[in-house]
Image (spheres, rainbow, N blue to C red):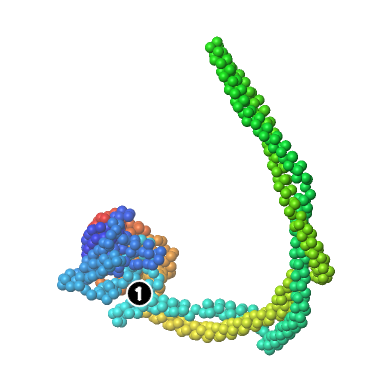
């Protein structure tokens, strides 16, 4: 199979970019960041699709890394390949919302149906692991995956026997490894240890018979306490009734005492008030004094009325005389200061005169007010004197009532004092529900303490029952876990036996084709190095040792350039063995970075003249093309 052309319609940085490839040698030149790695990934994606990751890794997976720079839903391309004289065109749309893949047979124009888009159904042996480990070779990544050796052995064994790739030793070992993890007993052992710690740490449980004895004893004590409380309440009932009756009588006497005292004081005050009114002075004297006060008031009032008119006349005369003098002064004196001074003097004289008049008038008003008040006082005394003559009979009645109230008050003092000596000031009625609490309080406290002990005992019993249930559950869980651990150990042993069989099978398979692989690697490496290393030995995990003519040397002791040549030889040998010597495209992405010019020239010469492979060299240097030109070898050149 060879690749004839690439059409990167929308892929990464490429847009509508068409690249044609030839058989034999192809040089794809481009500076750094020109898109060489993008082109390699495009070839892989066209064969196998874009790899997708989950979670945070999805931001850097193959799909995300090569989404078209111009964005949009267009994320697609085409590739034409030729195999055994037949031409096929592969078309893919990578866009996750509308993915598609089709293969068209160019000679017939028919679509080729592939189950699950498996390209290896069309091109035998072309799987993603084979592509990455054999056909695609990058700088400093020439060493195949060590675990890939198992897959290679299985494929070689199947190819030799059944022409299929049904056996997958690596997958089988990975499956057994995964299955063995399911039977890992570490978590079970940890849980068993935790259960053992819990069982050893639990306190001794309560004896059921001891619980019954304590519970019965507390129940009997509570019943005895309740009986004593009932007896105490019954014995105090009669005494409380008698005491209650006496308290009611004492309260009645006290209320009557208070009523008589209040009534006596009220009527005594009325009696005294009537006595004062009746003892006032002679009515004739009061009448004479009233007339004298009336005459004084009338005289003062007349003087005050006349004084109002006279004061206004005096004040008006002073004001007019002052204004006349002020006008004369204004005509005689033109100075502003003198005029202002004259105005101030006039105002002062006028204010002083007004104050003087107001003072005299105020004194006269005070004499008038005092005369009026005296007249009103004598008037009120005259009216009271007239009323006192009719209230003498009421005063006598009040005196008789006061005598009767005093007799009643004195009669209840002796029995009231007896009750006061017994109860003191506390004469309130007693609530029957609260009465006797001083007697019942110790019994109630005893009952509460007994109930608390009973509740504590029940709580301990409940906790003990739960602890016993937990202990039984833990023991049952431990029994189940022990059975599970025994089963896991048995299954783990079976899985280990199967894995050992597969590893033995791997060694047997390697023994079948390992000699052929060693011969091919040795031959290719010998040609690349000009016969410096006669033979190479490859183990079943693709570990490599080189014969330097004296001993086999581990590959890690060789120079980087020699190691890259050796890894390239191993990959090319695997290409030959996997694909049966058919022409296949081999992609070398800056593979010769560590090669010196001589080794690179030898390698290019061997690749172009002896392998029959389609070689696609992606490089940022011109020395590969220069070496081919110097050797006179044909090649197809593309510049990105």
Total marks shown come to: 1
Q: Is residue 566 visible?
A: no
Residue most extreme to the bottom: 209
Q: Quadrant of residue 281?
A: top right
Q: Alpha-carbon neighbours of circle 1 within 10 Å: few (<14), some, or many (≥20)?
A: many
Residue with the most extreme top position: 332
Q: Nearer the viewer, residue 424 or 585?
A: 424
Residue furthest front as drawn: 284
What residue is rendered at 47% in x and 84% in y? 491
- The residue drawn where x is 75% and y is 52% is 389
**Image quadrant in which the N terminus is located:** bottom left
Quadrant location of the C terminus in the rendered image: bottom left
Q: Is residue 7 above or below residue 121?
A: above
Placement of 22 over or under 316, stated as above or below: below
Whether residue 128 sits left or right of residue 556 in the image: it is left
Q: Nearer the viewer, residue 256 or 92?
A: 256
Q: Is residue 34 above or below residue 2?
A: above
Q: Residue 620 in the image: x percent, y percent?
A: 31, 55
Is 408 on the left-hand or right-hand side of 507?
Answer: right
Q: Is residue 363 visible?
A: yes
- Write down the quadrant of residue 34 in the picture: bottom left
Q: Position of residue 279 (x, y in %)?
A: 79, 49
The residue positioned 38% from the left and 73% from the top of the image is: 149
- Give residue 636's position: percent from left, percent from top: 23, 59
Between residue 185 and residue 501, name the one nearer to us: 185
Picture quadrant where residue 567 is located: bottom left
Secondary structure state at the residue bearing disc 1: helix
Identified at 78% across, 53% down, the residue is 275
Disc 1 designates what residue?
A: 152
Front in this rendered view, residue 459 or 347: 347
- Residue 442, horizontal then vertical, whole percent: 75, 77
């Amino acid at each position: 199979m060879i690749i004839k052309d690439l059409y990167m319609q929308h892929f990464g940085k490429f847009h509508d970019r068409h690249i044609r490839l030839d058989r034999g040698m192809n040089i794809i030149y481009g500076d750094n960041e020109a898109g060489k790695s993008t082109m390699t990934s495009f070839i892989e994606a066209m064969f196998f699709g874009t790899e997708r990751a989950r979670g945070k890794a999805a931001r850097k997976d193959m799909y995300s890394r090569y989404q078209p720079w111009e964005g949009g839903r267009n994320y697609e391309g085409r590739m034409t390949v030729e195999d055994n004289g037949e031409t096929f065109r592969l078309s893919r749309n990578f866009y996750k919302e509308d993915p598609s893949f089709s293969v068209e047979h160019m000679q017939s124009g028919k679509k080729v149906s592939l189950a699950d888009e498996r390209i290896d159904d069309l091109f035998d042996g072309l799987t993603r692991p084979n592509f990455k480990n054999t056909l695609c070779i990058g700088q400093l990544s020439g060493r195949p995956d060590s675990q890939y050796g198992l897959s290679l052995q299985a494929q070689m064994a199947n190819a030799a026997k059944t022409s299929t790739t049904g056996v997958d030793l690596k997958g089988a070992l990975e499956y057994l490894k995964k299955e063995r993890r399911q039977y890992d007993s570490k978590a079970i052992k940890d849980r068993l240890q935790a259960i053992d710690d819990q069982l050893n740490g639990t306190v001794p449980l309560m004896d059921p018979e001891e619980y019954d004895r304590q519970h019965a004893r507390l129940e009997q004590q509570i019943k005895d306490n309740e009986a004593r409380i009932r007896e105490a309440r019954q014995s105090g009932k009669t005494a409380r009734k008698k005491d209650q009756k006496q308290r009611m009588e004492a309260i009645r006497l006290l209320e009557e005492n208070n009523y008589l005292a209040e009534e006596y004081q009220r009527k005594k005050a009325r009696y005294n008030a009537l006595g004062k009114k009746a003892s006032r002075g002679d009515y004739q004297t009061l009448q004479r004094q009233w007339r004298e006060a009336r005459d004084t008031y009338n005289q003062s009032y007349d003087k005050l009325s006349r004084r109002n008119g006279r004061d206004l006349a005096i004040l008006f005369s002073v004001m007019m005389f002052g204004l006349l003098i002020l006008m004369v002064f204004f005509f005689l004196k033109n100075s502003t200061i003198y005029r202002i001074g004259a105005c101030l003097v006039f105002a002062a004289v006028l204010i002083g005169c007004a104050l003087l008049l107001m003072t005299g008038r105020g004194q006269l008003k005070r004499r008038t007010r005092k005369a009026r008040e005296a007249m009103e006082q004598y008037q009120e005394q005259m009216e009271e004197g007239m009323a006192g003559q009719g209230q003498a009979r009421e005063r006598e009645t009040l005196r008789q009532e006061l005598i009767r109230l005093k007799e009643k008050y004195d009669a209840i003092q002796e029995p009231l004092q007896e009750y006061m000596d017994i109860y003191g000031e506390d004469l309130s009625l007693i609530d029957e529900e609260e009465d006797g609490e001083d007697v019942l309080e110790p019994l109630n406290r005893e009952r509460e303490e007994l109930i608390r002990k009973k509740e504590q005992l029940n709580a301990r019993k409940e906790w003990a029952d739960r602890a016993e249930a937990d202990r039984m559950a833990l023991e049952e869980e431990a029994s189940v876990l022990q059975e599970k651990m025994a089963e896991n150990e048995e299954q783990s042993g079976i899985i280990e036996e199967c894995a050992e069989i597969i590893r033995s099978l791997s060694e047997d398979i390697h023994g079948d084709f390992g000699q052929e692989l060693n011969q091919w690697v040795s031959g290719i490496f010998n040609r690349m190095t000009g016969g410096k290393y006669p033979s190479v030995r490859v183990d079943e995990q693709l570990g490599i040792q080189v014969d330097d003519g004296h001993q086999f040397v581990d590959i890690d002791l060789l120079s980087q350039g020699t190691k890259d040549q050796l890894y390239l030889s191993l990959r090319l040998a695997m290409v030959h063995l996997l694909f049966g010597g058919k022409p296949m495209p081999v992609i070398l992405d800056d593979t010769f970075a560590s090669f010196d010019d001589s080794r690179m020239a030898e390698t290019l010469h061997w690749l172009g003249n002896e392998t029959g492979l389609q070689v696609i060299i992606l490089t940022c240097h011109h020395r590969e093309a220069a070496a081919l030109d110097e050797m006179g070898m044909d090649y197809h050149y593309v510049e990105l």
